[in-house]
Image: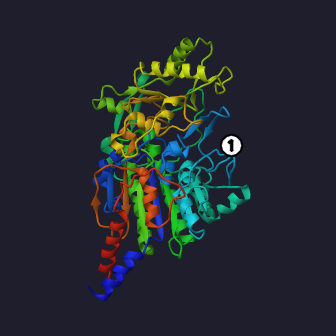
Amino acid sequence: MTSTAVAADDQANTARPKLIILISIDQFSADLFNGFRTEFREGLKQLSQGIVYANAFHAHGVTETCAGHAVIASGRHPSATGIIANQWFDQKLSVDRYCTDDGVHVAATAKRKAGVGPSLLEVSTLGDWLKAASPSNRVFSVAGKDRSAIMMGGHQPNGAFWFDGKQGFDTWGATAEEARHRLTPLAALNAQLARRLAASTQWTYVRGNCRVREARIPLADDKMFHAHLPPDPPATIAGQPAAAGSPLPPWLYDSVTVDAALSLIETERLGRSSSTDLLAIGLSATDMVGHAYGSQGPEMCDQMTRLDAELGRLLKRVEVLRIPVVIAVTADHGGGDIPERLAMRGYAEAGRIDPVALLAQLNAAARNAAGIDWNPLRPAFFDPTQLVVVDREGRTLADAALKRRIADAAATRALETSGVVGAWTGEALQARRVDPATSPDLLSVDDRMALSYFAGRSGDILLATDPLKTAAPALPGLFMMGHSGPSDFNRRVPILFWWPGAMPQERALPVEVVDLAPTLAAMIEVSPARSTDNVSRLRNWRRTADDDRRRFDIARGM
């Protein structure tokens, strides 16, 4: 071996990344990744030439955006993070609470009566571990949604930014003054966005191949959903006025998020100091498309093309800067397709559940079983699968024995209801112990739901619907498909690792998303503040990375 190769060998053994880019693609299921993989030409094609885990799983059962991003950032299940969903009913205060309404921090520009920040996140994150190792390490997050940016940024980022869809990017701080100061790195970008948002932007096809997915899909009440681009105006909700002006196309959220990420890399010189930096990026458009139009139509086809291009734009700039970087990509949850299209394709059992009728049935059963004359069940926010037991005034029922009787009756009745395939009382889930050594693909549905339970926030009754059914009406352009809960449609996501010189590897055996943050922490030689829930199925990561960097450096003659 030459002296150059020996030097490269020594460098590879001691070097570590100067920048970690952690990317979450909202609702990017393993099915989407695999289904469109041969179509990727830019960023996702390049990222797929690193280490690919196409069978990664979120182990928990209530698979929603806020919960999934907390798992990605912390290596803990929702049963530890306390972030059990996007919103819940606060059993102590008897109020609905959104997952970032922490009542402690404030936004730079938005007026949020309940505050906005990370204080409801009960655990530390990768960014927190990095800051604890050295205050000079910098942590930034940027996303199309506040819950994505805040959860991945952790408790003490240098900046956590989200696109509000109206004025540009916002952030949070302990005071309004601090929040406005934190927004400084994106001030110039926000000024540019103001001009961009003032102009109308139409959603048309990037490539013509997506047109073959166009279809007219019959809905209930003789209505029709025309899947095509540009999309028809979004549906309206009965009793509510139609939205003023044209909605922003979903892909714009990813475009401006990548703009912000590139701006932070440049202005903050991320990865180019003696410290180690973390940039977390939450790309939200895929989720917006999935919920509004489904995952198998021309809208999602076009979104995959645009997502691929945006990631390509990010990677090209990072490569030009020659930053010692590791990029990790995953998703907060997956998702299925709309039931009407599934029915057209032969899945006769696909359909919709009337959430109002479901709640009425369960309330009737609870009243009869408990001998009461009020409706004791209410959904957490609008989620019909998380139900809480309340008294006449709508507050948390204090009588524990009566609450148990009501919850038991409702769970029993739910299992007799068409479209409901699982029902649990919170008390039963709290008592359940899950073996961490169980492979995530083999976890029972009971275990999955137990990993989502957090006392005081989770419902008194939790339901799981048939994954081919949606408990919501069809509202094209607004909401066509919800979350499929503990099913593999929603749990199975990809994990991709890439760095310059990475040797392509396909790793087929199942791994858990909770392994991701601890794995990245090991790469940059920082320790989690407390134990995590991972079982190290992403093993041999450091050895693989060192070997590949060594080959890459030798090939460059370093």
Q: Can residue 202 be seen in this view?
A: no
Q: In which quarter of the image is the N terminus?
A: bottom left
Percent of width and height locating residue 521: 47, 62
* Left or right side of 373 for 468: left
Q: Is residue 380 above or below residue 177?
A: above
Percent of width and height locating residue 284: 48, 49
Q: Residue at point 59% right, 11% down?
A: 371
Q: Residue at point 41% right, 43% down?
A: 59
Q: In this view, does 512 lie above or below 182?
A: above
Percent of width and height locating residue 127: 54, 60
Res 103 → quadrant: top right
Q: How many marks?
A: 1
For disc 1, the marked residue is: 114
Q: In which quarter of the image is the C terminus?
A: bottom left
Judged from the image, the secondary structure of the residue bearing numbered disc 1 is loop
Front in this rendered view, residue 34 or 491 = 491
Res 466 → quadrant: top left
